[in-house]
């Protein structure tokens, strides 16, 4: 049993609290970003949530229209002649800090088959890079015959 952030009534799931659900959806389900969003919109919370809801509706409508257009475009698209599109991860950028208002970004790069972290002037081996916490991922196209 949880509580809606915007009322003192218990709720079994976040789905019973539309404001919480809107905030979490707008931040990709990231609780730290949701908290940051909440605190930065406290003065105009209802208006900000309404804007998020309107944006989500527009994205859903645009997605449906794009899917219909993509189906038609795929049927008439020319085939790709330069081989299969295979890629491998070369690196990623992640954030170190308790929230987006503090901390900084670091780069994790594969160098000579090993992960290396670049943190300002410090460069070190990264034995367990946080692969799921990247903000930007860098890929390299794999040519036929390469792995």
Image (cartoon, helix red, strand yellow):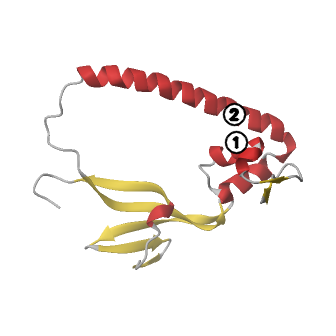
Direction from residue 18 to residue 79 in the image, left or right = left
Residue 1 image-quadrant placement: bottom right
Q: Which residue sits at x=79%, y=45%?
A: 41
**Could you say whether the residue bearing mark 2 is in a helix, strand or loop?**
helix
Residue 127 image-quadrant placement: bottom left
Mark 2–mark 1 CB contact (< 8 Å)? yes
- Near mark 1 (Cα within 10 A), the count class, few <14, some 14-19 or many ≥20, is many
Q: Position of residue 5 (x, y in %)?
A: 82, 53
* Of 141 and 69, the residue lying toward us: 69
* Of 138 and 25, the residue lying toward us: 25
| Quarter containing the C terminus | bottom left
Direction from residue 48 to residue 122 in the image, left or right = left
* Numbered badge on residue 22: 1
Is residue 119 positioned above or below 141 on the image?
Answer: below
Name which of mark 2 and mark 1 comes first in the sequence: 1
* Numbered badge on residue 70: none
Q: Position of residue 131 (x, y in %)?
A: 44, 65
Q: Which residue is identified by label 2?
A: 53
In whole angstroms, how far apart are the C-alphas of marks 2 and 1? 7 Å
Q: Which residue sits at x=19%, y=25%?
A: 78
Is residue 22 positioned above or below 5 on the image?
Answer: above
Q: Position of residue 10 (x, y in %)?
A: 84, 55
- Near mark 2 (Cα within 10 A), the count class, few <14, some 14-19 or many ≥20, is some
Q: Which residue sits at x=38%, y=74%?
A: 116
Is residue 136 positioned above or below 121 on the image?
Answer: above
């Amino acid at each position: 049993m949880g509580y809606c952030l915007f009322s003192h009534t218990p709720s079994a799931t976040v789905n019973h609290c539309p404001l919480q659900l809107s905030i979490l959806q707008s931040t990709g389900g990231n609780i730290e970003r949701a908290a940051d969003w909440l605190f930065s919109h406290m003065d105009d919370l209802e208006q900000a949530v309404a804007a998020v809801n309107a944006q989500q509706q527009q994205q859903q409508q645009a997605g449906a229209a794009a899917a219909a257009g993509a189906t038609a475009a795929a049927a008439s698209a020319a085939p790709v002649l330069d081989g299969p599109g295979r890629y491998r991860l070369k690196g990623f950028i992640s954030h170190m800090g308790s929230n987006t208002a503090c901390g900084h970004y670091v780069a994790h790069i594969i160098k000579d088959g090993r992960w290396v972290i670049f943190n300002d002037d410090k460069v070190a081996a990264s034995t367990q890079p946080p692969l799921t916490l990247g903000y930007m991922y860098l890929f390299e196209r794999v040519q036929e015959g390469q792995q």
